[in-house]
Amino acid sequence: MQLGTAFRALALTTAAVFAVTACGGSSGPGLAATQELRAPIDAEPGTLDPTRTQWNYEAAVDRNIFESPLKASMDFKNAIPSAADSFTVDSTGTVYTFKLHPGAKWSDGVPVKAADFVYAWQRMLDPRVAAPYSSYYYAIKNAAKVNGMSAKDPGLDAAVQSLGLKAVDDNTFEVTLEGPASYFKWIASLWTSAPVRKDIVEKYGKDTSGNDKWGAVGPAAVQTVVGNGQFMLSEVVNKDHITLVPNPNYAGANPKATLTKITLFEIEDPTVEYAKYKSGELDITAIPLANTEAVRNSPELLKTPELTVFWVDINVTKAPFDNPKVRLAVAQAIDRDALVNNVLKKGYAQTTLIPQGMRNYRPDLVAAQKFDPAAAKATLAASGVTAAQLNGTKYIYSSASSTAKTLAEFVQAQLKANLGVDIVLDGFDTNTVSSRLGSGNYQFGGPSGWGADYPDSQDWFDIMTTGAGNNFSKWSNSTYDTAVKAGDVAATDAERDTFYETAEKTIVADAPIIFLYQRTAWHLVKPYVKGAVSTPNDDWVGDLFTYTIQITTH
């Protein structure tokens, strides 16, 4: 999942992330009567349309109000039924059949049907929608062809109908792939795989820019956003918070929610967030850098090694970073050990795309971005670009985040000390940074990064293929693309690993992104939250389920 530049949470925050309570009466021995969650998200979502979301603070909402066919298991080792009661794969490995839960309903009481999943996945691959996660669905029959068509192609509507998506009956959703893809079950577990109602999208129409108004973030979303998840919107206050309450019509396979309310506060600055936690206004918080040592021994501290890597994005389409040697020189000039030991005081130095804890983590094969000031100067000299020519290049970052500012200043100091280059720090609010990264309106900046949507390297390598919605560097490399495509469809892990190693070597050496570190998440959780379990894909406390948590009075 694309991480927000405000640097707080990789929020694969499911409806059940926490069940937290207000002080007061009890519904049983030691249990509180009012079940309520008060949690922070980075910023206001740009959309509530699950087809268009890509940022952590967007998924934090959509995971709650929509439900995909599958979900990650609690141990994060498998994808298991969610909106579907079961799924099967045929003997060829190319036909996935999802049996939806009978009686499931949308938040307005209308039955959930297989046709809703077909429509949602067709929208995902329709180039007119420009869904950031569309490339993840290319394993589907005709998907890459259809998604690559011009939005003005007169044959597009017919082409969309040719996708390998079928509603066999109201409760049976069938997906046909181009070929075997062992990772595809994880695609069906993404929040972007949730169903969407065609009549709702058409009812609320489009704005002057052609965007569906039904997914717009604002007070009207309470009426226009209809979901099939355990929760529904009850209040949207722009630039402040989003409130969720149980969906009274929820009839999916999962147990009904025990929470009475979830309030997601839009807080970009970790320092403000931390203060609200200390004052009792929040039930969970990330920890600002300045407070790391103060909480190191706190009984409320929950530490989670993450499958999360942060980096600096480089716009390879703009000089001077269209020169790969310039990019590599910058990478070699950054001391990542100093970053994790002296600045962050947690995490791991990182010079590869794949994080520790995943099968394709191979730092022994990839040393091109390793910190080496002498090599950095030599690489820059070989590029034909001088340090003086790099002076004044602009590094964008989220000025709302004290952590992002600290990291920007660290990069600035490293380039000055080790390359003699003076860069300019250019701070903006989080949504502006996200927008500029997506549109390519920047030179370099961040840090941004990726957290595992699922524990398969395909989830990582595909984000940097040519034209992928999360490829903010606008990088295109045929060697990389070919290796990733071959790895995605290889029959065995050994074959996949060979192709993926080629991809890893290529991206590290060509340096469209400059790797910084792998995060270990530290969060404070109030002591009245019992049974919280964390998984390595989420920097809160993981993908939890309401029926696993006991809530006590306080």
Image: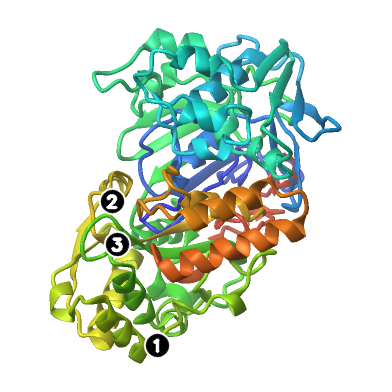
Can you name the residue that lies furthest to the right here? 91
Q: Which residue is mark 1?
A: 372
Mark 3 vs 1, N-terminal side: 1
Residue at point 61% right, 46% down?
17
Residue 289 quadrant: bottom left
Q: Which mark lies nearer to you, 3 or 1?
A: 1
> SS at mark 2?
helix
Question: Which residue shows up at 76% across the image and 47% down it?
Answer: 78
Q: Which residue is mark 3?
A: 445
CB within 8 Å, label 2 to label 3: yes
- Residue 204 point in image, percent of width and height: 38, 12
Return the residue nearer the eye: 226 or 349: 349
484 shown above or below 198: below
Left or right position of 268 against 120: left
Amino acid of disc 3: Gly
Q: What residue appears at the point 67 percent right and 42 percent down from the top-left corner? A: 186
Considering only vertical position in the picture, is 336 above or below 101? below
Relative depth, front residue between 385 and 234 = 385
Please tell me whether residue 374 is drawn above or below residue 299 in the rendered image.
below
Left of 379 or right of it: where is 54? right
Secondary structure beneath label 3: strand
Q: Earlier along the polypeptide chain: callout 2 or callout 3?
A: 2
Determine which residue is flagged by label 2: 433
Q: Residue furthest bottom?
A: 374
Q: Position of residue 32 (x, y in %)?
A: 65, 43
Tag 1: residue type?
Answer: Asp
Q: Inspect this view and state whether residue 65 appears.
A: no
- Number of marks present in the image shown: 3
Report how far apart the C-alphas of labels 2 and 1 lie in the structure.
30 Å
Q: Give x and y (percent) for residue 171.
A: 74, 14
Give whichever of 57, 322 is nearer the camera: 322
